[in-house]
Image (cartoon, rainbow, N blue to C red):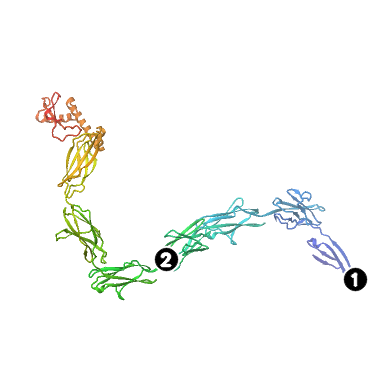
Amino acid sequence: MALHTETSRSRLIIYNAIIEDAGIYRCQATDAGGHTEEASVVLEIYQRLTFQDVQSPQEFRHGETAEVVCDVISSPVPVVVWYYQDREITEEHHSKFQVLANNNLQIHQVTKADEGVYRCEASVEARGEIDFVDIAVVVNVPPVLSVSQQSFNATADYQESVTFTCITSGSPDPVVTWHRKGQQLEPSEQHFFNRLEGGRSMLTIRNIRQGDGGTYSCKATNKAGSQERELFLKVFVQPHITQLKNVTAVEGSAAMISCVAEGEPLPDISWRRASDGQTFVDGDKSQDGRFEVRGRHGKSVLAISGVRLADLGRFDCEALSRIGGHQKSMFLDIEYIPKFLTNHTIYYSWEGNPVNISCDVMSNPPATMLWRRERFTISAEGTANTRVHSAEGKSVLEVTPMSDRDFGRYNCTARNNIGVRYQEFILAQADVPSNPYSVRLSAVSQRLATVTFMKPDSHGGVPISYYLVQYKEVGSQDWRDVKSHSVQTTVVLTGLEPNTTYEVRVAAVNGKGQGEFSHTETFQTLPIREPSPPAVHGQRGMGKAYRLGLVKQDDGGMPIVEYIVKYKTDKEEQWMTKLVPGANDFAMLQPLQWNTRYEVEITARNVKGLSEPTFYQFFMPQKPDITAESLFSGLGLGAVVGLGLGALLLLLVLVDISCFFLRHCGLLMCITRTLCSKKTATSGKGKEMEEGKAAYLKLPLKEENGKESLKPDTIEIKVHSDNSIHTKPDDSKA
């Protein structure tokens, strides 16, 4: 804008006039006398059609009322018309569309279907001016998020994987992120992300661990908004015992055994005593009230009151849930004061005889042991007549009494950190045993007698080694000794004379010596008499023989000279007699008849006479059939094959001999011609065969049963030149 003033006029020049420059301008003039005059000028400015900063595209949220802005100016005011899909938008036809007073297009509850290009057309009819602008309308749809499965289960520490899936829709396509505990998850070796068609977004959790359990969220976001869904991972953990230690308790005190286990869900804990298999669970209490189980939150305590040695041993803790179990063992060790294991506290010996006094102790921890004699400690090196031998749980005091003062009381002291115990031993002087009594004689025969007796009332403090039995003939002064076998109270006297009176007495012998004899008993052996009848048992023999077993009974005091065996058939009257030496234990009866019953009478004889007879019967079977099967049944497979090969070889030899003499062929003929031709070449005597010289063959005899005879006799076969065969009957035997 510029102002030019001259003497008689003034000009106001407006450059680049704009709408705002329009209006009433006043020109005021004042003369020298101060008189003022003014004039008004009206300035009108016409603006051409102009769209001011129209945005395209214009974005709106699904469901809201959208206002598409079309800012157009002109002077005079333009007329604005809206088009969509080449059709004019009028309120009559499109109730959801409305053109506002400011020329903007309002769309009620805009949807994705309303998305597209809209044309805003403006015109000034007075000037015939018209223009338009295309505006892209974009409808953004907020994300819609869904999950196919909301809860997942997995087991830890088994390299398991779980995949969460979220299905999203929206415009523009939402961006999906995964979150846990307020933190966005990033790709890693454990967390793997994947996106597939159809809006499927997946999170895979690999190598599930216990700490991976809990809530995860899937979040979908775009310009229109965001939506979030939660997914839950339940991680199950196999039971695992994390704390179980060996326990040492003192006998009589209380013991607390604790077992701690982890797992999801928390496992139930139970106890098992290995010694008897008894089990304890939470809340259990044993019948005697000593065992009680208390458990809480994966921890179980087995409380034992008044601990006993029987409680020593292994206890098993088992943690069990519905997905598995775990077991561990511990050892309950019991410490206790030394305990002496033997009640043998009196030992016997005599001067010069060493004796071992054993002090046996059971203790935990191991005890140290000392020997005392009249308040004096016996050193480990010992003294002139004492020596100490030590081993775990045992101490042996070797004492060799030299005089009376070495006998008496000895004290064994056992000590550990639980306590001390004492045991007193007495070394007493041993004596010889007292006399046996109740001597009895039984089973008295001509040569034997059995002596029985009762043990003495006192063995003298030293075990009895054996019993000495003495016997002699009445009137004789020479006692004969027989020792018992170990400490048996029965002794058999042998080699006695028949019909003789003997005296017998018994004494016990121990390490100290021989005790007093019992009272003397008298007995008489039996006189010599005839033997008792023999016992008989039969056994089938071979062929027509029968083996009759003989068992000697009482021989009457003298050896059996012979057995007289008489036998006959049940249909005959005449007895056949066979004498068998007394040393034999069988008689062979033969030949007998087939299919016949026999009666037998056997009598034993000694120098005194004959026994009563023993009667016996047996039956001979029918005569067996002699067949090929019976002939070879006794032979083994090898023998049968051998006989067959021998027969075949013999047949081949006979055939070869026949061919030699009848047809002048065969193996023998070949050998003969070879030998004869050699003989002709050297001596010129090749015509011996033609001159009738005989050849002799000797064949072994055959018995009736087919076996070769071992006799030297042979059958001589003479072969003449006319091929006839003659046998010398004098040289053959049937």
Q: Residues within 10 Å of mark 2 (few under 14, many from 20)?
A: some
Residue type at tag 2? Arg
Front in this rendered view, residue 255 or 88? 255
User: What x and y, as percent, mark residue 407?
Assistant: 26, 72
Numbered mark located on residue 35 in the image: 1
Amino acid type of the residue tagged 1 in the rendering: His
Q: Earlier in the sequence, mark 2 or mark 1?
A: 1
Q: Which residue is mark 2?
A: 308
Residue 719, by quadrant, is top left
* Badge 1 density bin: few <14, some 14–19, many ≥20, Cα 10 Å: few
Q: Is residue 534 left or right of residue 134?
A: left
Left or right relative to 82: residue 637: left
Q: Is 373 or 201 nearer to us in this picture? A: 373
Task: From the image, state whether disc 2 or disc 1 is nearer to you.
Answer: 2
Q: Residue 586's quadrant in the figure?
A: top left
Left or right, 600 with respect to 220, comes to left
